[in-house]
Image: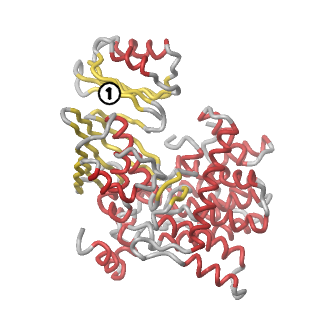
Amino acid sequence: MKYRSAFDIIGPVMIGPSSSHTAGAARIGRVARTLFGKQPSKAEISLYGSFAKTYKGHGTDVAIVGGILDFDTFDERIPSALQLAEEAGIEVIFTVEDTVTDHPNTVRVKLTEGDREIELVGISIGGGTIEITELNSFELKLSGEHPAILVVHNDQFGVISAVTNILSKHQINIGHMEVSRKEKGKMAIMVIEVDQKIDQDVMTELEGLPNVTQIIRMVD
Amino acid sequence: MLFRNVAELVELAENKGVKIAEIMIQQEIEVTGLTRDEIIAKMDRNLTVMEQAVERGLKGVTSVTGLTGGDAVLLQKYIQSGKALSGNILLDAVSKAVATNEVNAAMGIICATPTAGSAGVVPGTLFAVKEVLKPTRMEMIEFLFTSAAFGFVVANNASISGAAGGCQAEVGSASGMAAASIVELAGGTPKQAAEAMAITLKNMLGLVCDPVAGLVEVPCVKRNAMGASNAMTAADMALAGITSRIPCDEVINAMFLIGQSMPSALRETAEGGLAATPTGRRLQEEIFGKKQ
């Protein structure tokens, strides 16, 4: 089931004009911002398919940048997001791509600040609902609607159980989980959507685990 | 999940002897873990956003490009002149649907139902039938949950995205959702609500998404007008006892398959249909200059 809630259908409350090209785009930008954890100094945005063809008319550009500025879908500052980003010192680069993607509303967002960098691919599947399908070249599926943790780790036995043991100790229930790796025995990622809030002490404990290289928290 | 298709939804409501809205609320409690009060309050806030959008649109707005705006006001004046041919409630629904979409095109705040491009139909019909049926606030909230239930089935079994399935997936879905909700608010049975949805969606099949210059303005605003009037007519037909020969779930599946075979030029790329007409092209050039 792609849609789970009545509010996926009656909602979101948003700035017009398009739920997929404006609200969905803003949500993808905001997930990127959340995953990055802070304001970037540079945002490189590549648009594909219908996003590429109609972004000007739908305000897709301002919406994504608004999301990167941490604006919600109904934030009235969205129409002026490009100017606000410039004022905040964020360099924004848009590229329109010809490549045909699996989903017509696809965007690739790369955020950088110094050495810090994330790159993700998001799709807007209709009515403002989105999915993140790729993060730092890992394929994954993240809705952005639930608290989640992303664990970058070495692909070795025991890491998954160590992580889930900590979650279980803190009475955190896992709603959805997947593991993805680029190559056997190399770097891997766990995406864990949970039902409860993830406190900092849980984060610290996870970060201390052997073979875990990075933990990213995604708050609802 | 309590239901995956319209048949299951109707059966559940009938067996429990409750409205479709109630099944949607129960499912929401189950899926989200929120309390009934929290869920009702959330929908109440969405209803308020819809009310404010209609109010704002009826005062008159204009989009940034100037392509749309002011038609809701024209229609209200025409209704008041007493010369309207097609009935005041129907035209009121059309006018309020247009009002919402004019606000959307002007980058105002709206509530997507199920999308922004089709956000006029559900509130437009609700605030029009409100004048005759005099629902309580709770009944208006239930109207939205009924719409959500039917939209939920369409979204999961077909599509609510113009880029994926054309306008039939957006205004078509919205129109079917609204028709079902009108029937339920007017006292019709869950089965009649499903018939209304089927009749409506059947008449929206094949509708393409061809926005001029890629803007959610032309023809989107007027498609919402027709979506509202289609919903009102189908609701009355279902309440009169008329049924659809093709069951609702099969109509939804037909919509999905039609969307899959629709060429990309007619799925929100602004490359076909009205967007590709000489006037559509000219407007695009006037707004964005030659070749983006």
Q: From this viewpoint, is residue A125 visible?
A: yes
Would residue A21 be seen by someone viewing this image from the given angle? no
Q: Is residue A163 above or below residue B241?
A: above
Residue shown at 71% from the left, 78% from the top = B88
Q: Nearer the viewer, residue A140 or B108?
A: B108
Looking at the rendering, which quadrant does residue B252 occupy? bottom right
Name the residue type under label 1. Ser
> Which residue is depicted at the point 29% across and 48% down?
A88
- Residue B164: percent from left, percent from top: 42, 56
Whole-percent x, y for residue B169 in the image: 50, 59
Foreground residue, A139 or B107? B107
Secondary structure, mark 1, is strand
At which x and y percent is residue B156?
Answer: 53, 46
Position of residue B94 in the picture relative to residue B270 (left or right): right
Q: Chain of mark 1?
A: A
Furthest-front residue in view?
Answer: A87
Residue count near mark 1 (Cα–Cα under 10 Å), binned few <14, some 14–19, many ≥20: some
Q: In the visual, does B154 lie left or right of A51?
A: right
Mark 1 sits on what residue?
A180
- The residue at the point 49 percent across, 42 percent down is A2
What residue is drawn where x is 43% and y is 29%? A148
Q: Is residue B264 above or below residue A199?
A: below
**In x, y percent, where is residue A93?**
22, 52
Quarter of the image where one finds residue B64: bottom left
* Nearer to me, B250 or B199: B199
In the displayed structure, would residue A12 be above or below residue B263? above
Vertical placement of A127 versus A2: above or below?
below
